[in-house]
Image (tube, rainbow, N blue to C red):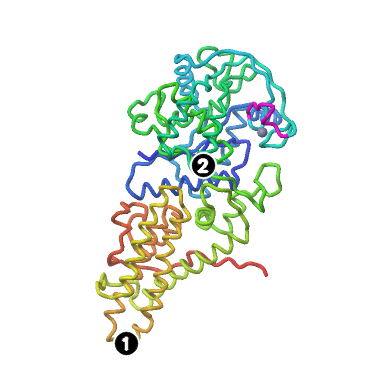
Amino acid sequence: MIYITTPIYYPNDRPHLGTAYTTVVADAVARYWRLKGEAVYSLTGTDEHGLKIVRAAEERGMDPQEWVDQIVERFHETWDLLDIASDDFIRTTEPRHTASVQKLLAAIHAAGDIYEARYEGPYCVSCEAYYTDEELVDGACPVHDRPVEIHAEDNYFFRLSAYGDRLLAHIEANPGFVTPETRRNEVVSFIEHGLDDISVSRAALSWGVPLPWDESHVAYVWVDALINYISAAGYLDDEARFAAQWPAWAHLVGKDIIRFHAVIWPAMLMSAGLPLPRQIATHGFLLVGGAKMSKSSANQILPSDLVPTFGPDGYRYHFLRDVSFGPDGNFSWEGMVARYNADLANDYGNLVNRVLNLAERFRDGEVPAVASEAAAEEAALRAAAAGALEALAEFEEFRTKQALEGVWRLVRAANAFMEATEPWKLAKDPATAGRLDEVLNAALESLRVAAVLTWPAMPRAAESLWSRLGLAGSPGDGPLAETGVFGTFPASRVAKGDPLFPRIETEA
Ligand SMILES: [Zn+2]
């Protein structure tokens, strides 16, 4: 079972390009595994407890539950807009989650890893996190660059300090546990520096999950949030499903939340005697003109600003093709238009249009299922298709850019095939009618394979191409080891239709 997760998002924030980036990568990788025929469970959701939610609701004279019920819709709308096909959407206010939080915290408590003590320190409400004085930058939150508040309360603490050696041993024995390597090094040095115990409860807050052994406290929102990954896997009361689904294949996270995922979360699981996720796959920030997107900055862009121009497929393709998973990435409108026009409108869209047009013009959309085994042109095409199929496995390492570069080698080879074989010339001479059939068949077969291989990144366009090709089912049906192999295009009736990716005209 491939169980893949995004972080759960704060519903106070609108789903912006950064949020959407993680979610699109998770969706494309999940689709890749489905295409291969693996059982997949993909999860996203929202993190609905904590002080920020209470304050936002109060400002509007609303009850926190009423507020989160209203704003969670933005997430459903955005994910629908981007064709995100998650298997599950978890909200931390759901009973299946709150009961799981209590179950896991009770297990950690029973293990002797919880104690009560007074805590006082700088607290950033936006992060929902305490900081040490050294971590502050000029007295402000290092993430938000805004003033912190001093909070003091009697809290329950988790003995994180007891897990440093075990965490280091796990990371050493499992080099792929935290990726990329720069992030693993950062985590290792953080642990080696010495771990402090962490507060896991809040006495002053009522909007949260009550601790099972002391209902006057609620679970700290971050501890609450991390547990979503097992709540959605059946931890509470579905042993069979939990055994099949957990540990997760990968948690996808941004670099700002790596300590929660690569230090605190595995220590909590160790304490409760549960296995650790296979991989914490960490990506960088998405920058707009070099600045991190944040709610307060003018450069915040929403997916709904871009989808009307680029479509869901153009949107997904750009971020998967142009942003490497790991380092910080940059977004620019100009770059997105250039990528769309070059790869989608020109290379791919024109190929589709040209091949289907010739099939309609010369064979009334019905090309016989005949292929040449001997022709050098087809051999080149078959080799490119095999290379593209192999490159698709880059999705397993979140190397979405390399996967799509591989697919485009097939697209370019198919364009070169058309130039080399010149079917419009073959059509003029009745003596080459047989060769024309073969050439059109190979060209259509390239489109069929391209539809399969682009489906994880661009499901809507791939499905549209599939139906133009007159094929039954979906290019996502798989299994990839069969449908991704270049062979002979089956007898069907193809239809050109409207341009798949109309060119975007930019103003001079
Ligand atoms: Zn902060």
Residue at position x 48%, y 49% from top?
A: 83
Mark toward the viewer: 1 or 2: 2
Quote the CA–CA distance across marks 1 and 2: 58 Å
What quarter of the picture does the N terminus occupy? top left
The number of numbered badges drawn on the structure is 2
Mark 1 or 2, nearer chain start: 2
In reply to whether residue 28 is colored magenta, the answer given is: no
Q: Position of residue 333 (x, y in %)?
A: 62, 58
In which quadrant of the rendered view does residue 249 lie? top left
Residue 384 sits above or below residue 438 on the image: above
Left or right: 179 as drawn, with respect to 256: left
Q: Badge 1, how many Cα within 10 Å: few under 14, some, many 20+?
A: few
Residue at position x 36%, y 47% from top?
A: 34
Mark 1 falls on what kind of element?
loop
Q: Which residue is mark 1?
A: 429
Is residue 43 visible in this depiction of the protein? no
- The response on whether ligand 1 sits within 8 Å of label 2 is no
In reply to whether residue 133 is colored magenta, the answer given is: yes
Q: Do residues under tags 1 and 2 come within 8 Å of each other at their CB atoms?
A: no
Mark 2 falls on what kind of element?
strand
Is residue 387 visible in this depiction of the protein? yes
The amino acid beneath tag 2 is Thr
The amino acid beneath tag 1 is Asp
Q: Which residue is mark 2?
A: 282
Residue 467 sits above or below residue 326 on the image: below
Q: Badge 2, how many Cα within 10 Å: few under 14, some, many 20+?
A: many
**The residue stretch that appears in magenta:** 128-137
Residue at position x 55%, y 18% from top?
A: 210
